[in-house]
Amino acid sequence: MKEKLTEFTICPMTEADLEGVLAIESNSFPNPWNRAHFLDELRSSYAFPLVTLGPEGGVIGYICPMLLLDEGHILDVAVHKDFRGYGLGKLLVERVIAECREGGADFVSLEVRPSNHAAIALYRKLGFKETGRRKRYYENGEDAIMMEYIFKEDREERDAV
Ligand SMILES: CC(C)(COP(=O)(O)OP(=O)(O)OC[C@H]1O[C@@H](n2cnc3c(N)ncnc32)[C@H](O)[C@@H]1OP(=O)(O)O)[C@@H](O)C(=O)NCCC(=O)NCCS
């Protein structure tokens, strides 16, 4: 990890953040989400999209999770290219894990491209485990690796105390 970034905050995404979010999204994915996708997340009662704001108040990262009954899911996460490697992606995913745990989720799931080594390393580091593959899930025919972070073990450990 690079030297620590200290001046940033993580807060709920609002419509005012979308310009910054869309700029990062289009620089991060071959098939980026558009404004309507993000507006759907902002309006959904199950979604709780978050942004990371940098030292000057601009968007430098974001994550789009949802929590529906006992299932947490991460649909989208990205960090601005200039701010990668500072631990911000890890903080965003950790925040979602914490919120899903508090909200009573049994697990948090996500899909990732097998070629996305940075994201896979991040998820593994946080305790996500591979649970299967979705064949030809992405637009270029690439499979998706399905991963899950499971709270059950945490809960069993707590209950045993
Ligand atoms: C994946 C992504 C969000 C990671 O964000 P980040 O802020 O750079 O990641 P962090 O600095 O928090 O890294 C945390 C850990 O992830 C892993 N990691 C992050 N980038 C990595 C890289 N380029 N290569 C290998 N491992 C990497 C490391 O284990 C790292 O821990 P360490 O620094 O102690 O070694 C960022 O690379 C990104 O925005 N990518 C484009 C969008 C994307 O692919 N999103 C995921 C879709 S599934």
Image (cartoon, rainbow, N blue to C red):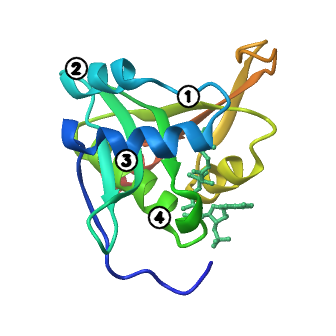
The image position of residue 121, as x and y in percent, is 70, 55
Taking depth in this image into account, of 133 and 88 the one nearest to the observer is 88
Q: Which residue is mark 3?
A: 20
Res 22 quadrant in image: top left
Q: Is residue 155 visible?
A: no
| SS under mark 2 | loop
Closer to us: 126 or 18 = 18
Rendered residue at 27%/45% (across/down): 17
Q: Which residue is mark 4?
A: 88
Q: Amino acid under label 2?
A: Ser
The percent position of residue 48, horizontal first and vertical second, equals 25, 36
Q: Is residue 56 left or right of residue 154?
A: left
Residue 142, x across and y down, in percent:
81, 21
Q: Residues within 10 Å of mark 3 (few under 14, many from 20)?
A: some
The disc, 2 or 3, on the residue closer to the chain's N-terminal end is: 3
- Kind of residue indicated by mark 1: Pro
Q: As rendered, which of 130 and 65 lies closer to the eye?
A: 65
Pointer 2: what residue? 44
Q: Residue visible at 32% across and 60% down? A: 58
Q: CA distance from mark 2 to mark 3?
A: 20 Å
Asked if disc 3 and disc 4 are in contact, CB closer than 8 Å, the reply is no
Q: Is mark 4 within 8 Å of ligand 1?
A: yes
- Give the residue at x 31% y 38%: 18
Q: Quadrant of ligand 1?
A: bottom right
Up-down relation of residue 83 to residue 25 (above or below): below
Q: Point out the tag, 3 or 4, that comes first from the N-terminus.
A: 3
